[in-house]
Amino acid sequence: MTSPTRRCKSDDNIHMIKAAAVNTTAGGGASTSPSSSPATTPDNSVKGEKKKCIIPKLFSSKRSSIGSYEEDLTQSDNNDQEMDWKIISRRKAFLETSATVKRSFSERHNSARIEGLNLSTFDHSTAPATMIKSIRVFAGTWNVGGKTPNHGLNLEDFLQVEGSADVYVLGFQEIVPLNAGNVLVSEDSEPAARWLALISHALNKSYHESVHSCDSSSHNSKHSKDSKSNSFHKHSLKSLSKSLRANSTILKTCNCPLESTTTRRQRKLSDPSCSPLNHHRDSSEEDLQSIAEFPSSNGLSYNLIASKQMVGIFLSVWARKELAHHIGHLRISSLGRGIMGCLGNKGCIAISMSLYRTSFCFVCSHLASGEKEGDELRRNADVAEILKSIQFSRICTAPDSRMAEKISDHDRVIWLGDLNYRVSLSYEETRLLLEDNDWDSLLEKDQLNVEREAGRVFSGWNEGKIFFAPTYKYSHNSDSYAGETTKSKKKRRTPAWCDRILWRGEGIELLSYIRGESRFSDHRPVCAVFAVDVEAEANNKNAKFRKGFSCTATRLEYEDLIPLRHSSYHY
């Protein structure tokens, strides 16, 4: 058994603990009544005070920490909401900016001001920029009826020298009589040389006058006149063409704008190597005298680019000296359509060349004759065969060059000659309409117009409006048509527009289409003047452009050539 004294002490301790617990739950700081509190000793009072001080502090610190935590949570929630709003607003602004960027990019990409720029591709090997130049081309055709010209024949009126074209294309038919000897044996080249000399005297008049004035100063006038007449007769076609022609080595080679060929093309025609004296020539005294009288093509205003004779057909092309070194790819082809469908009394000569970056083809033809019904079909067949069979060799060294090999492949084509299309009316009906100057009614019966409108020949070709009288057939040295002064029906021919000039291609504008009035032949010459656009390389060789750019497009400012940056944001 336990003693009473020990039990009392333990009871006191229990009461003290309970009292402390009651005080704690009551707020920790309130005092209890004396009746409910047990008796205290000094030691117990000290211990109680300590407990009263420590326990409330613990609970108050816990409550304060809980309150600060709740405040932190509230502040954190507010911060998260603010961050969410910032993210949403930025996302919205980003989407709006992206749409603006896409729209502005599309506008820039489809803008008409930079229509010529291809923003999707940027080639390292860009094509050189090009520009358009306009030149004047004179084209003339004349059937001279087998007559050889003399030195007194003046071609200045026919060539309209006062107009001063840049390029002259001159085609002749029947420069020799179309007899068996010239057709079957060998052609006579002397008339062709005479025509070349006459053309050169008309185009290079100032040069030849200066040469003759020098001759007259050292000889008496009679001797000078005789020497001029004799020099006209002793030219051979080969030597004369050499003395008048620009450097054929350069003309026949490629003039494409490549680095490999640029150096070659920059060689001037005035170099000593270009002189005709340096070419291989015959050692005959006649050739040497001929070249001496035409010492060099450098003093001429117009150089002979090419010439070709096929029996009676003769075609020559002349160009200003300044243009000669821009001409290349020179090629010549011919086709006989005469006797047995192959001899050269009928047919054509075609000359192909490039001026700057534009290809040209000049065709001189003499088609099937005859004014019987159905003869126009033979002429249609000649045209079709010429277009089909004329083939030019490929001499271009550029790998991506579109070198023209057929007549229709060229950028600009001029076809001239005695096409021999007649008027489908009787002689009497034609004469009545001519007396009334009713050319419109006659042209409605013109075979070439009828066949073209029916699409049977020269489809896609153009001809100027005719405002001149029929060019065939005139009496010798007369303004009267054959048949007016004679009653023989054998020599009578129905007047017709046999001599014509047509063209094909873009960039050709007809300026004039007239006939000459020379009585030298039974045909009147016909000539046309064209303004022709040619594509040339731009002068700024160091400029870099995007592929497909051309100076012929809408003019751009300097800033428009700088590509714009396509970023994600637009501020």
Image (spheres, helix red, strand yellow):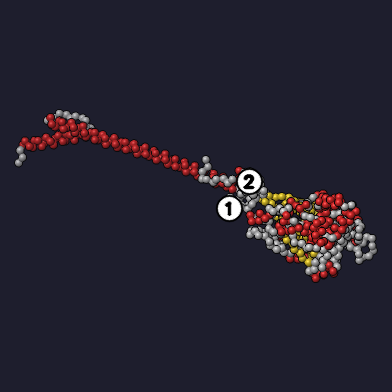
Residue behind mark 1 = 124
Q: Quadrant of residue 174?
A: bottom right
Kindly tell me whether residue 106 is visible in this rendering: yes
Instruction: Tell me residue 149's x, y (percent).
Output: 87, 59
Q: Nearer the viewer, mark 1 or mark 2?
A: 1
Left or right, 402 with respect to 224, comes to left
Residue occupying image coordinates x 56% and y 46%: 105
Q: Which residue is mark 2?
A: 113
Q: Amino acid at mark 2?
A: Arg
Q: Amino acid at mark 1?
A: His
Residue at mark 1 to residue at mark 2: CA–CA distance? 23 Å
Placement of 364 over or under 26, stated as above or below:
below
Name the quadrant of the N terminus: top left
Nearer to us in this view, 402 or 443: 402
Quadrant position of residue 343? bottom right
Q: Position of residue 457 (x, y in %)?
A: 77, 62
Residue 255 horizontal side relative to residue 198, left or right: left
Above or below residue 61? Residue 306 is below
